[in-house]
Image (cartoon, helix red, strand yellow):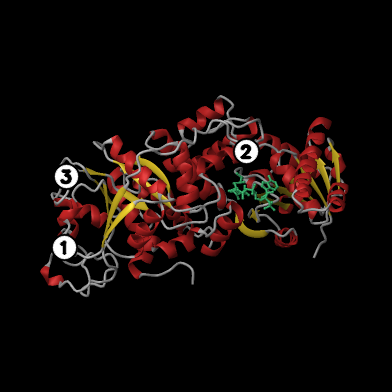
Amino acid sequence: MREITTVGVIGLGTMGAGIVEVFAKAGLSVVGVDGTPELAERGRGFLEASTGRAVAKGRLSEEDQAAVLGRVTWSHRLTDLAGADLVVEAVPERMEIKRDIFTTLDGIVREDAILASNTSSLSLTEIAAATAQPQRVIGMHFFNPAPVLALVEVITTLLTDDEVTGAVRELAVRLGKKPVVVGDRAGFVANALLITYLARAIRMYETGHVSREDIDAAGKVGIGLPMGPLTLADLIGLDVVKEVCDVLYAATHEPSAAPPALLQQLVTVGRLGRKTGQGFYAYEKPGSGVVTDAPEAVGRPGAASSVAVVGTGDLATDLVDRLTAAGTTVTAVDDPGADTASLAGTPVVVLVGGPEGSCEDCGSGDCLIAEGVDPSDATACECCHGTAPEAWFGAVAESLDSRTVLVPTDEPSAWALLGRIDPEVQVVPVAVHRPTRSGSLVEVARQIDGDDGAVRSVDATFAAAGFVTLVTRDRAGLVVDALLYPHLNDAVRMLDSGYAGAADIDTAMTAGCGYPQGPFAMIDEIGADEVADGLTDMQTETGDPALSPSPLLVEHAVANRSFLG
Ligand code: 3HC
């Protein structure tokens, strides 16, 4: 097996400088090249600053920093790459520039040197075709920030030599990275999934149904990703996001991949995200991640002083505990036989799904029949008796008047209210999500004729109980599922297309984008049936064919099969 000890990196912007750092930290000799002495000097500055931050945090000793910096030489001449075993190009995503560089490199590097591109969106096959030896051309796609994220997508063309692929794969492992080897297809694995998800989030923002901060809270707190989609788009660079959208759309003609109008406009006016100091957010200065136009953090007035939680199960218990801890007077109603007339006048009444798995007829986990109640009474179970769960929650609803805001937390609870409530009673549905590493999210749905005060009160009540909250229009999937489920569906489509396996797709998203779990682990946890049903609801509501669940997802739902062994 060949030895790679000296590498060249061309283009010393965010990605290129990060790649230099990765190589130098792994003990390789690096030649960093950019177009002018000033740009090469800027590259040196990036490396000094990044390793300096690590020293300041005590993660790197000063001696090690000196050793890392000592392994790198800086240049503005491609001819200085003559001795390199491998060259990684990381210049802007313009095919003519890349082809030009690769053609020139052909005449500079040794016969056996490997030529790699960090392109995130362009066709590697087209780049390879510009060289005399396309068999030594390969993709080495790092993720931003390169020193932190572990994924390297190793992209092969039909002509790439197996030995070259093996050497690059092995090098990636030596660098402490996780390589995923795939063929040359628009967006490869991670960008094809991630950037389509970001485009969806941007389109959602365009609708004005939900704020910038709330979309980001949905991604970070609701789904549990390291950052919200608009913050991440600003980090990646909106020009890069748009370029990848353009390439994906050109390859697939899927409307979901098309660059949203707002994205195009931001790029046109030069608001490219953190690097220019302005994108979806405004930043302290170019390159900074400190947001300067965040709305003032005002407390949320209007939290209800007294709340009733009607229902049983873990969520009901958790809500009672949290609200009580927040100083709210809580009435827990966990018995369908209880007198509910006394709830009249309670400012907020939360309805939570009934006892789980208590329907002996169908074994449904969502059944609203309380323990000990005979299902043949046909009052409550919508799972197998075809009637809405009206008995318990319906009775509660009937005892309330305009002094109360009713808060169903799931669909059966909402259905139970149909035709049973005084039109004066405000209904504000919410979705309470599982806790993630960033907190517990509650989505508050604003209905078309919903009263602002009622929405604010529900929002404030959950916020006071320690939830992160967001407010959005009452649409299928609200924000979290409307972002997540199509994203998961895209992953299933990619698997079904034969481009990459489930384990590689999961590695790409965990190692490349910091996901706590990959898409297939998420589907297995949520349930393929739930994801497919959620997509169908969204598709029914919007008529968007892109939201139809992939046949492979439906198969897994029907067969009750998990994706990962
Ligand atoms: N360079 C070096 N180190 C960095 C860094 C940088 N630019 N940014 C952050 N770090 C380090 C920090 O020093 C810190 O290290 P420590 O824990 O040892 O002190 C660690 O990363 C965590 O950083 P922070 O505590 O400041 O912040 P977070 O915990 O929020 O992590 C993040 C920041 C690593 C950026 C994380 O939010 C994340 O993983 N976000 C997702 C990023 C993502 O999806 N990237 C892929 C984009 S797609 C792409 O690049 C492909 C392209 O083709 C478009």
Is residue 135 visible in the rendered image? The answer is yes
Please tell me how crowded label 3 is: few (under 14), some (14-19), or many (20+) other residues with Cα within 10 Å: many
Please tell me how crowded label 2 is: few (under 14), some (14-19), or many (20+) other residues with Cα within 10 Å: some
Q: Which residue is mark 3?
A: 401
The tag earlier along the polypeptide, 3 or 2, is: 2
Q: Which residue is mark 2?
A: 289
Residue 58, given in percent of the width and then of the height, sits at 77, 52
The answer to whether residue 144 is above or below residue 262 is below
Residue 263, given in percent of the width and then of the height, sits at 50, 33
Q: Amino acid at mark 3?
A: Asp
Q: Residue at x 52, y 59 (%)?
A: 518
The tag earlier along the polypeptide, 3 or 1, is: 1
Name the mark nearer the viewer: 1 or 2: 2
> Which of the pair 286/300 is nearer the observer?
300
The answer to whether the residue bearing label 2 lies less than 8 angstroms from the nearest atom of ligand 1 is yes
Looking at the image, residue 272 sits to the left or right of residue 47; the answer is left
Q: Which residue is mark 1?
A: 386
Q: Amino acid at mark 2?
A: Gly
Q: Quadrant of the N terminus?
A: bottom right
> Which of the pair 99/500 is nearer the observer?
500
> How many angstroms separate mark 3 from mark 1 (CA)?
28 Å
Please tell me how crowded label 1 is: few (under 14), some (14-19), or many (20+) other residues with Cα within 10 Å: few
Q: Residue at x 19, y 55 (%)?
A: 416
The answer to whether the residue bearing label 3 lies less than 8 angstroms from the nearest atom of ligand 1 is no
The tag earlier along the polypeptide, 1 or 2, is: 2
Q: Amino acid at mark 1?
A: Gly
